[in-house]
């Protein structure tokens, strides 16, 4: 048993560099997804994350077909266009007809995803993109990725570099527009009265969401990105009452889930992306059950002791 | 009636396929497009027929159940359960060692049930919003499924498990056993809808009301969710776990745009679902390696788009057109009203209105007034000669009606709603265009056939309206209104 559990440690220490890059990549994408996703969770827009992560597939596929390569810029533009179109179509359907937002999301994203799958399966021979990439991502093959040189001797895999650039963009956007994002997330009506347009904030969020999703897409696939978006923010939301602390606590969560994910992947010889999601889910379960203030155990103890001063769940948060 | 048709269709299908043995489309080497099309439509191959029947059954199930989800605003439940069954599928495979339908079905159902309980647990014990909870369950279960799937595929022999077909669907891989399972599920769904039709309808639209009249809402919900999980689990055969939600949502949402009553909506949605299923099967048959699910979804969306634009009542273009004609009518009526006001100012001595007077009345430039007058002339309400404008009889009648509506409504607001007389104008300004004959009659009765509005101005009576409609009313002495509105309306022949 102990041999089985220690097996991964030996394997990882046998090739520390390969696994280090996988781990770093995991941290970077979980962090950027988690930061953006935290806002989605707070704004009750989590399913928009689900929708966009599926819907960028045709954007990426068309970009592949046009440029003929996995050019970063083409992919970014394709994903951005697809993401914005998805949001626009969802708005068009649920504002102009009596169809509600949830159905509108379902219609639009599944159509986009279906078109994407058809494009990929029709032209799978022409481009270096297949359905496995959509599902599992290629974080396992990071060692094969081309490298860029930094300074004299250091090298950096290109996907890691790209994901880091996106992370910097995400951090800068949130840093500069912190107040605006905060106020539009918690009180859209009030933010309208003080001159911060909730619609503009919404579309801005969609833009950085699309960028983040496309940077994570290659590594973990279209569907597991949803977990990266929603799980860290939700886990933090279980025990944080301030937006700043919530965002900060996503850092340790993403480091833990990536590390644990790499370990699980080696242990069971399975997809690393999937393993990272499972790890993030385990963290969520831990926080849910054992959180001292509001966890399941705390709730149960409050109930059995009959204590009346059980902390209230509030929808909003103060800053 | 519909149910009878559906039932007989269903049994026909079952009898038709009963004696056949399982065959795989994949065994037949495809040649060219045209031959494939001929092969499909000649229904020679058992495999083609089976794939088609499978897709039809799935389209039927999902189309029917999707209506309830769309109406209950639970559309994304389908997506959540659809993704969440993947680990169950893998565990079922691991348990049985083959891709036999029954263990996979049981595993998938267990995973789906676990997922829905987890969803309820998260939303009821934390402050995480419902949509985020759905996202958590959906993606975590899917992640677990991917871990299991890659684990299976890296085992010896696991590569041929065919489990990846569950991701995007391959209706060509439908076996006879699958078909029996689908048939059983379809029977279950149809029977539930048949026997508990009223309960489901009432519960879906107004669950509070349903519980007050004694419907066990908890049980109905469990039944609906059970049907849904069954339909999703067999549905992933054809469309795959990712796209099964589209089978639920898109046909039902399309039906929601064209039908007002749930039974009719169910009918339309079921037909659309079956059409999409048949089309998807056909497309994926045209070439090897094409997944079925995406084509089904694309076809369903291609039906949705024109419905979204052109549906008679809820279509966007139709709505736009209705709004626009209402706007045009309102503008015309406002011009007519202004003309009436000019007449009134001058004591109804002339039948002509000068352009300048009208411009002053409406506080508009002469160009603007000219434009609206052209509109009036185009609709046959007025004739223009030079700088002067004369109302036609129908124009005069309409003008009286509008002013009458306006003043009656003002009086009603002051007398019966207790709104101050100087606050009623704006509201009347809007409602005057939409009041119809019955409402005017009712208002008159309610107000006891008034003659003046709260501002002391006369309300045009029915005689003035009748006057407008006959040509001999246009006498040289003018339209002498004052003599006529003394007598209230007393019936058509008065």
Image (cartoon, coloured by chain):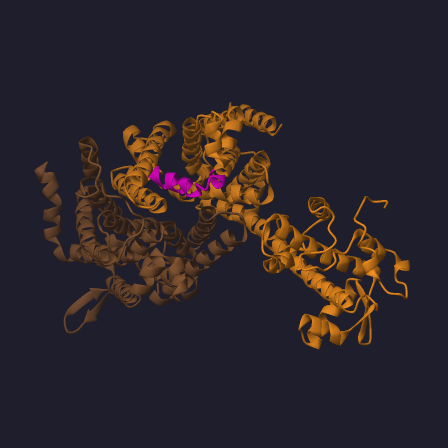
Chain colours: A brown, B orange
Q: Is residue B82 a member of the stretch shown in magenta? A: yes
| Picture residue at 69% right of the left edge, 73% below the top | B368
Q: Which residues are magenta?
A: B69-87
Above-or-below relation of A48 to A80? above
**Can the viewer see residue B129?**
yes
Above-or-below relation of A44 to A298? below
Residue A194 placement, left or right of B427: left
| Picture residue at 29% right of the left edge, 30% below the top | B97
Q: Quadrant of residue B123?
A: top left
Image spot of residue B82 (x, y percent): 39, 39
Above-or-below relation of A14 to A169? above
| Picture residue at 21% right of the left edge, 56% below the top | A245
Residue B109 placement, left or right of A243: right
Above-or-below relation of A35 to B494? below
Main SS class of the magenta portion in the image:
helix
Q: Is residue B491 a member of the stretch shown in magenta? A: no
Image spot of residue B245 (x, y percent): 44, 42
**Can the viewer see residue A62?**
no
In-front residue for pair B422/B323 = B422
Quadrant of the drawing holding the C terminus of chain A = bottom left
Q: Quadrant of residue A293?
A: top left
In-front residue for pair B281/B351 = B351
In-front residue for pair B349/A29 = B349
Disc count in the image? 0
Image spot of residue A294 (x, y percent): 21, 42
Quadrant of the drawing holding the N terminus of chain A = top left
């Amino acid at each position: 048993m102990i041999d089985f559990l220690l097996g991964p440690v030996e394997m990882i220490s046998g090739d520390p560099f390969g696994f280090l890059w996988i781990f770093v990549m995991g941290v970077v994408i979980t962090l950027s997804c988690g930061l953006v996703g935290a806002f989605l969770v707070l704004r009750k827009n989590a399913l928009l994350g689900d929708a966009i992560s599926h819907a960028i597939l045709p954007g990426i596929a068309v970009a592949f077909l046009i440029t003929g390569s996995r050019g970063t810029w083409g992919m970014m533009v394709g994903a951005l266009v697809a993401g914005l179109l998805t949001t626009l179509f969802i708005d068009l359907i649920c504002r102009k007809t009596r169809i509600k937002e949830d159905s509108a999301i379902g219609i639009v994203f599944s159509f986009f995803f279906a078109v994407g799958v058809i494009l990929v399966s029709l032209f799978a021979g022409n481009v270096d993109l297949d359905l496995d990439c959509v599902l599992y991502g290629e974080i396992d093959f990071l060692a094969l990725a081309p490298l860029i040189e930094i300074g004299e001797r250091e090298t950096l895999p290109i996907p890691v570099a790209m994901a880091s650039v996106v992370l910097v963009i995400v951090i800068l956007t949130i840093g500069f527009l912190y107040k605006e994002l905060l106020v539009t997330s918690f009180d859209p009506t009030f933010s309208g009265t003080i001159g911060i347009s909730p619609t503009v904030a919404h579309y801005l969020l969609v833009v950085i969401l699309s960028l983040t999703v496309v940077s994570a897409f290659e590594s973990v696939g279209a569907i597991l990105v949803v977990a990266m978006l929603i799980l860290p923010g939700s886990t933090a939301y279980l025990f944080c009452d301030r937006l700043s602390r919530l965002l900060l606590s996503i850092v340790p969560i993403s480091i833990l889930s990536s590390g644990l994910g790499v370990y699980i992947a080696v242990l069971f010889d399975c997809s690393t992306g999937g393993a990272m999601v499972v790890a993030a889910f385990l963290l969520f379960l831990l926080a849910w059950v054992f959180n001292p203030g509001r966890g399941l155990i705390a709730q149960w103890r409050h109930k059995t002791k009959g204590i009346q001063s059980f902390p209230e769940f509030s929808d909003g948060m103060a800053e | 009636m519909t149910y009878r048709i559906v039932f007989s269709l269903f049994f026909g299908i079952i009898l038709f396929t009963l004696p056949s043995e399982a065959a795989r489309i994949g065994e037949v080497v495809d040649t060219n497009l045209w031959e494939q099309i001929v092969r499909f439509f000649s229904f020679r191959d058992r495999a083609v027929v089976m794939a088609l029947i499978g897709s039809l059954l799935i389209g039927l199930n999902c189309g029917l159940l999707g209506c309830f989800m769309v109406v209950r605003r639970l559309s994304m439940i389908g997506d959540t359960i659809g993704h969440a069954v993947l680990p169950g599928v893998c565990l079922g495979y691991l348990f049985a060692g083959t891709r036999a339908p029954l263990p996979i079905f049981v595993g998938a159902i267990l995973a789906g049930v676990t997922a829905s309980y987890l969803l309820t647990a998260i939303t009821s014990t934390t402050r995480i919003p419902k949509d985020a909870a759905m996202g958590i369950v959906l993606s975590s279960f899917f992640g677990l499924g991917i871990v299991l799937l890659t684990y299976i595929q890296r085992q010896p022999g696991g590569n041929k498990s065919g489990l990846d077909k569950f991701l995007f669907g391959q209706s060509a891989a439908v076996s006879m056993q699958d078909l029996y399972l689908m048939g059983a599920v379809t029977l279950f769904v149809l029977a539930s809808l048949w026997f508990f039709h009223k309960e489901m309808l009432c519960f879906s639209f107004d669950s509070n009301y349903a519980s007050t009249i004694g419907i066990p809402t908890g049980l109905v919900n469990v039944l609906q969710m059970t049907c849904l999980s069954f339909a999703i689990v067999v549905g992933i055969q054809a469309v795959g776990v990712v796209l099964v939600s589209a089978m639920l949502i898109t046909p039902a949402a399309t039906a929601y745009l064209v039908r007002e009553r749930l039974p009719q909506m169910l009918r339309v949605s079921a037909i659309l679902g079956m059409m999409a299923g048949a089309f998807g099967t056909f497309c994926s048959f045209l070439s090897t390696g094409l997944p079925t699910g995406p084509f089904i979804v694309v076809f369903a969306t291609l039906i949705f788009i024109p419905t979204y634009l052109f549906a008679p009542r809820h279509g966007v273009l139709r709505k736009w057109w209705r709004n626009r004609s209402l706007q045009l009518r309102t503008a015309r009526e406002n011009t007519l009203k202004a003309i009436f006001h000019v007449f009134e100012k001058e004591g109804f001595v002339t039948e002509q209105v000068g352009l300048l007077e009208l411009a002053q009345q409406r506080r508009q430039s002469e160009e603007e007034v000219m434009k609206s007058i052209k509109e009036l002339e185009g609709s046959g309400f007025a004739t223009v000669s030079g700088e002067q404008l004369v109302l036609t009889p129908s124009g005069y009648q309409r003008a009286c009606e509008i002013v009458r509506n306006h003043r009656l409504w003002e009086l009603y607001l002051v007398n019966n709603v207790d709104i101050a007389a100087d606050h009623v104008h704006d509201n009347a300004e809007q409602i005057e265009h939409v009041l119809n004959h019955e409402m005017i009659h009712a208002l008159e009765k309610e107000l006891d056939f008034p003659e003046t509005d709260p501002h002391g101005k006369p309300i045009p009576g029915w005689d003035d309206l009748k006057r407008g409609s006959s040509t001999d009313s246009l006498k040289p002495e003018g339209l002498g209104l004052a003599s006529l509105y003394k007598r209230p309306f007393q019936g058509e022949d008065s």
